[in-house]
Image: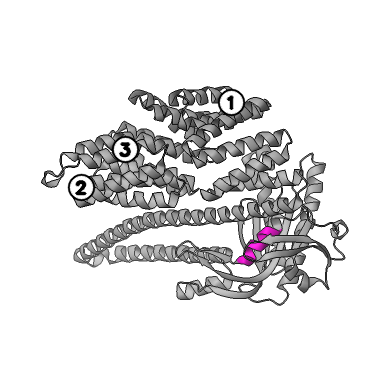
Amino acid sequence: MNCKTLGIILLLCAHALAMHAQSQGGAASDNNKDTAAVNLLLQQSKERFSDDPVKAISLATQAKDLSEKIEFVKGKANALKNIGVGNYFLGKLPEAIVYWNESLQLFESLKEDIGVSNVLNNIAAAYDDLGDNEKALEYSLRSLTIAEKSADNYRILAALNTVASIYYEKKATWDKALNYLLKALPLAEQVGDKDGIGVTSGNIGEIYFYKNDFEKSKTYYENSIKAYGGLSNSSYAYNGIGKIYLVKGDYNKALSYHNKALEIAEKTDSKHHMYLSFQGIANVYIAEKEYAKALLYFNKASGLAEELKAPRDLKDIYQQMAVAYAKNADYKNAYKYNSLYADVKDTLYNIDTDKKLNKLQFEFDLQKKEGQISLLTKDKALQDADLKRQKFARNAFAAGLGLVFLIAILIFRNYREKVKINKILDEQKVQIENLLLNILPSEVAKELQQKGQATPRNFDQVSVMFTDFKSFTIHADKLSPQELVEELNTCFIAFDNIIEKYGLEKIKTIGDSYMCAGGIPTPDKRHVHNMVSASLEIQEYIVLNNKRKIADGQEPWDLRIGVHVGPVVAGVVGKKKYAYDIWGSTVNIASRLESNGEPEQVNISASVYEIVKNDFTCSYRGKIYAKNVGDVDMYFVASSNNKLAGKVSASTFSI
């Protein structure tokens, strides 16, 4: 889904009120210095955002310099904000974020909640365009909180749209995004903000498009165009209607709307809208099987997307270009763009992994605080109980020897209770130690228990295996959540048993992907052979399991496996919630070998082949490009006595 145009209009919507705030602040500047010239420059800068962002930046820079000269802090804050907006319209998102952060500090020092909310929302829009959804959501929710506290409808409107744009990145949160947008639209109509109506209607139209409700989608897109009067930012809605006609098979109308969107984008020099239009036109030509024309526009789109540093959009464009080149019989370029697609995909995977780790750390810190509160409560209860026992003992002693027997009984009962508690604690200690051994290798777990930390280590030779189920998303859509998890659990338990049999170390599962390694943390001379044997046994299990599924009338689950060997760094992730993991190009290459493998086969690199070639039947199948490494030779492998051996083909790799 492509929704990165949302933030642009919101910036304009936010600046309408910013000018109002500037005019109020002018008369209150220190020493009665004239701020009218600063406000005029800011207004002129705002008017040039769409048609001449460079001029807008120049005017805002003059306003900043003059504000510094007359010590007009609010003027400087708004000037820095305008410079950021100009850079945003030029597609220079990192530069825009830098200027907005400077502006944010000044607004916070002035305790200007409206300005703070405005800039926070702008930063959120930029991070959204860069694909950093976590930061985008953080900043947009902060903006919304401040806006609602200030009862500022313009800020609320802007923040609602930005939060919605982040939520409808994923199908699972479309309804949540739609909820925010349906709150925003009447608010935009209430304040008479045409830009707000335009962007909100366009965003609602986009969600309905991906929900396949094309009638509602077209209605909201048309409302967006009407609100803009067919000008500048209506390019987004024209592209949306073009996509609807493409789905309906009316290629002429689809092309007409995409060309109209391109014409508007070129007039305003909006590079983001331009590459969306190029991509839309290319998709129409793909549908018409005019691959040469499609590639012409895909190349234009990819150039702009690369310039704007939009990795998520580049991923889609590279994938489409690889298919188009293959259809056009240009296999060299098809291979090139398939490799670029894989590189971007790997980058996004790493970004998503970092985000998941951050989220896990946050959840752990929260649990830790809750645990500390619980311990304090228990400690107080124990102290109270101790005081009561002391009081009771003093009273019992004063009552005389007649109560000694009663006291002895109470002491004995208390002793039995303590013995019972200690037994429970001992059992819990064993459970905790077993859980730690289930999460971490025994060597690492022992080091953590003894030293409180585990030192990362370099390993010169580690074998790494990745598995992944082909077309898993299709299987997931056809099964209930319970059936899906049960099937995955059955397979992964089988994988666990196999790798344990061969003395390998499970690293983690990622969705439907399974990762393990050999030769760590304890070196093993046979780890590469063991990894290949385990891979073949896993494929054999999947083949037998698929026969059972077919016999039961179910669809088979095909598995790809990739194996590579090389140096890695291994260690424990985080300081609190432990997870043993490995890093390095060896891991990335193993992942690439898996994604370029085939069902029922084990795809290995040349490094693995050189070690096992005398013990396994291997068949060369071509090369794969690995980032920072170059081309890597690939082989299918099977042991001579393995049931899969007969299925290994000598065909070379093709896209």
Residue that label 2 marks: 72
Q: Nearer the viewer, residue 639 or 129?
A: 129
Residue that label 1 marks: 213
Q: Nearer the viewer, mark 3 or mark 1?
A: 3
Q: Is residue 589 magenta?
A: yes
Numbered range of the magenta stretch: 585-593
Residue 128's place in the image compared with 602, above or below, is above
Q: Let me know if residue 207 appears in the view.
A: no
Q: Which disc is residue 357 wearing?
A: none
Q: Residue furthest left?
A: 31
Q: Residues within 10 Å of mark 1 (few under 14, many from 20)?
A: some
Residue 134's place in the image compared with 45, above or below, is below
Query: Gap between marks 3 and 1, in whole Å?
Result: 42 Å
Q: Secondary structure at mark 1?
A: loop
Q: Nearer the viewer, mark 2 or mark 1?
A: 2
Residue that label 3 marks: 44
Q: Nearer the viewer, mark 2 or mark 3?
A: 3
Asked where in the image residue 637 lies, by quadrant, the reply is bottom right
The colour scheme used to paint the residues is one colour
- Taking 543 as reference, is 359 left or right? left
Amino acid type indicated by mark 3:
Gln
* Residue under the point 64% across and 48% down: 318
